[in-house]
Amino acid sequence: MMIHQQWRLGLVGVGLLSAATHSAAFDQAEIERGEYLSRAGDCVACHTAPDGVPFAGGLAVDSPFGAIFSTNITPDPETGIGHYTRDEFAAALRDGVRADGKKLYPAMPYPAYARITDEDIDALYAYFMEGVEPVKNEPERTDLSFPFNQRWGIGAWNWLFASAEPFTPDETQSDELNRGAYLVQGLGHCGSCHTNRGLFFQEKSLTGGDSDYLGGETLEGWYAPSLRGGGGDHPVARWSEQDIVDYLATGRNDHSAVVGEMTSVVAHSTSRLNEEDLQAIARYLKSLSGPEGEGPAREQAGEATQAMLTRGDVEDDLGARLYLDNCNACHFADGKGAPQVFPSLVGSSLVNAEDPTGIIRVILAGARMPSTEQRPEALAMPDFAWRLSNDEVAEVANFVRSAWGNEGSEISAGQVADVRDELPEDRPTSAPTYID
Amino acid sequence: MAKTNPPVDVVLVGLGWTNSIMGMELTDAGLNVLALERGDDRDTVPDFAYPKMADELTYGVRYKLMQRPAKSTLTIRHGVGDMAVPYRSLGSFLPGDGVGGAGVHWNGHTWRPQPQELRLRSYIEENWGADIIPDDMTIQDYGVSYDELEPFFDYFEKVAGISGKAGNLNGEIQEGGNPFEGWRSSEYPMPPLARTYNDALFADMARDQGLHPFPLPAANASEAYTNPYGMQLGPCNFCGFCERYGCLNYSKSSPQTCILGALKRRNNFAYRANSEVLRVELDSDGKRATGVTYIDADGNEVFQPADLVILGAYSLHNVHLMLLSGIGTPYDPESGEGVVGKNYAYQMNGGSTLFFKDKEFNPFIGAGANGEIVNDFGVEQIDFGQEGFIGGSYINAAMTNGQPIRNMPLPAGAPAWGRGWKQAVQASYGHTMTIGSHGSNMAYRDCYLDLDPNYTDDHGRPLMRMTFDWKPNDVRMTQFMKQKIDTLSKALGPDDYRLSFKDFDSRYDVRPYQTTHNVGGAIMGTDPSTSALNRYLQSWDVHNVFVMGASAFPQNLQYNPTGLVGALAYWSAKAIREQYLPNPGPLVQA
């Protein structure tokens, strides 16, 4: 029998009840505030195994040094963090130190969480002690090879790279801008993905003044674009504040749609934040300076591509023909798709990324937007791996990377083959059933 | 012995348009709702994904999204003295299957009835007297008025995302819309679809003829759209794969694109596909339903207790389930007594195919609801007394697709095979347009549904039996439309044209596709002795059973049913939420 959804409401109800009976040291408002902050920190993303109980740990977080397994952060006293005092909890979040004194790997974004204020630590502690159901679960232990299994080495790394202090507002800026900076630098830990990492895998900068901060980085083949909205030729610089708010709230806006690792961030974290906080984040990102100057002249190039596709003048251009046959139905001849529904390919950070892994993945495996409260439809692009050869994917990707004024580098069928080899075998497919 | 599931507040039988609506409304009311859908689970991606959906052989000819007659069918006969035989090969109508139901494979023509269609008998009696109604014609009022339903038409159009042009905004006639429509409180949510060449030709000609052309109200999005549930449609690209297909482009309104994504997020909603309901179970005195018995995906018989049962299967199956479950008294055509199965009706359509050597229509640029309409010969526009029939039609120049297997119209006299056929195809493809009439069908004493005495399904249940044939009143109506379309066809100046209309010797033929607008059988009304449901779609006999869909129509409209079906579901849901839940029992005292 296929039961598509459990009676989750019932389960949650029971959970809250039993949690509330074992003690009642914190008031409900504080617990709820902590829950909200845990969303902002997206704790659930890493501390939940695939199909596992939220916060019970066990997700393998890939690092260049091997898989780091997330821990159980439910208040179970033996396998979770039920025995943590408030200060031990604070030390884990802000300093990366466990209750037993051992150091956490910096897959835990404590260099960013160091910005969390004392009041917010209190609320998070209240939530994790009393708002979360204790679960007995011993996730797999992280077992990195030498020298990365020497946790003492993290101390030196911390001394060099994890230097941030709890956030103090900049009195010269508005409350909104300070709130945005706090969320982005702290709980949001946006820099974990969007800030370029140095030789020692450290984020090159942890705060806004430095141009490395949120300047863009490639992680696991996905390009996490620059979030410095004040200038430069990248989407966030071109977007309005409302575009940023829409993207974070719904995973889509008038220009783009979320793909890759950010999909889960939108689903579990940013779409759960309130409008004021999203607005503050957008304002802060737009305040970060970027390079002066204009991007390429897309308008004319865009018109030329559109006219060529509209004429169907694609005899000598396999990539353009493949675009018409496979992509045009939704993304259209102007490459712009449709606002909030079909993402634009023009100037897209995914399409133009230096590392083409992301765009190849999307063509091969398709993509699906998250279902969110405001935009519940998980709009999806089908997979084309069953239909297009490596050569054809390279052709269509190269067409898209050069059409409408896009400036992505040329890619080869070999690069497509490498990505194809890495696709999970059990991924969903729209291939007709008569295709082997 | 059937397994028994934990009880739920509401069980929804079927998960198409109506029960998706009910799911939203009743979960809003805080109830635990479970939907049982006998077909497969389906979603845009992967099930309707490009390019596999653009496969005419698989979906258009072999009906992959439809019910399989070997699994589910009914028997059909022309008259009460005939032996009915099973509908073994899909033809005349195509009941949908799976999550989304017929809302997946429709074209998207979304109409409101004209106000007088909902009170047809009263309207006739007031204007011409009861004498003009033939003795065997059993038409009735719906028991709900257009004015009462207006907010629900409006909301359904916003949920479904309809592209169109209003003709009557709060009583003010609007240029470019249908001047003969009932009043509407707001403009359509989206502007009309882009116009194709056939639309423009027809519109210009119709205006020259003194008629009032307007764009067909389309459940095909003309632009990006977000509905009140936050669900989204993308602009239709006129791919020409609409009817019989799921939309590959998120452009056609369906339960999937308009409701289900939002509904599935709700913690108090669940659904089970591949779960076929066999019957509604009643308590010992037959006044109250206790739940439903169904066959689950593993073939087990399961009893699902529920406080409220909503039948939202296809119209024919709703009636079948009522007959099998003993809800209401079966209709008897001899005595005219009984109500369940009464007033089965269909749709009276005809058309003209026009051939132009010098015009290129590019028919592969099509959308399910791409069409230009005149409603000058609608139910409210015709003087029934003078014309000698009751009914009306809208006239439609549509271009939905240029699919090569089924859409290869050829002029009269063209060879049906071989080289001559190929030459005719080459000369004609892309050079034709059509003008159709889509008309009402009245209800008759001997057109009805009951249980077949001979045939059973694979669960051992009697099949349902349909008794139906065309009647002179409706043939007179369609012959009237034939004259009008003949005039309009000539006015367009084609090189040749071919008319196809029912005539007085026409018998109902189940083989060629006509329309999947099977209505009646569980009709709504004001009197329990002549209707199965009260005005809120509640069973007169079993108060916690509500029956959605076009099975409630006492006779058929001139229009496609979905607009009224959607509005009635919201109307019924409001009554359940505001009247039934606080005080469960009959909402109308008999």
Image (cartoon, rainbow, N blue to C red):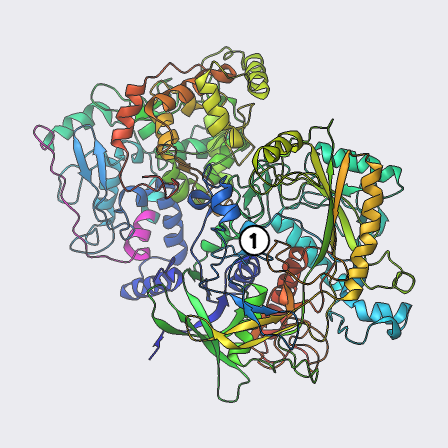
Q: Main secondary structure of the magenta part?
A: loop
Residue B102: percent from left, percent from top: 55, 55
Residue extending farthest bottom: B285
Relative height, residue A318 to residue B473 (above, below): above
Find disc 1 in the rendering and name its residue.
B103
Residue A352, percent from left and from top: 42, 19
Q: Is residue A137 magenta?
A: yes
SS category of the residue bearing label 1: helix
Residue plotted at (40% across, 33% down): A259
Q: Quadrant of residue B400?
A: top right
Residue B249 vertical position relative to residue B244 in the rendered view, above or below = above
Q: Most extreme residue toward the left, as rendered?
A: A146
Q: Residues within 10 Å of mark 1 (few under 14, many from 20)?
A: many
Which region is colored magenta?
A124-150
Q: Which quadrant holds the N terminus of chain B?
A: bottom left
A222 relative to B332, above or below: above
Q: Position of residue B555 (x, y in %)?
A: 72, 67
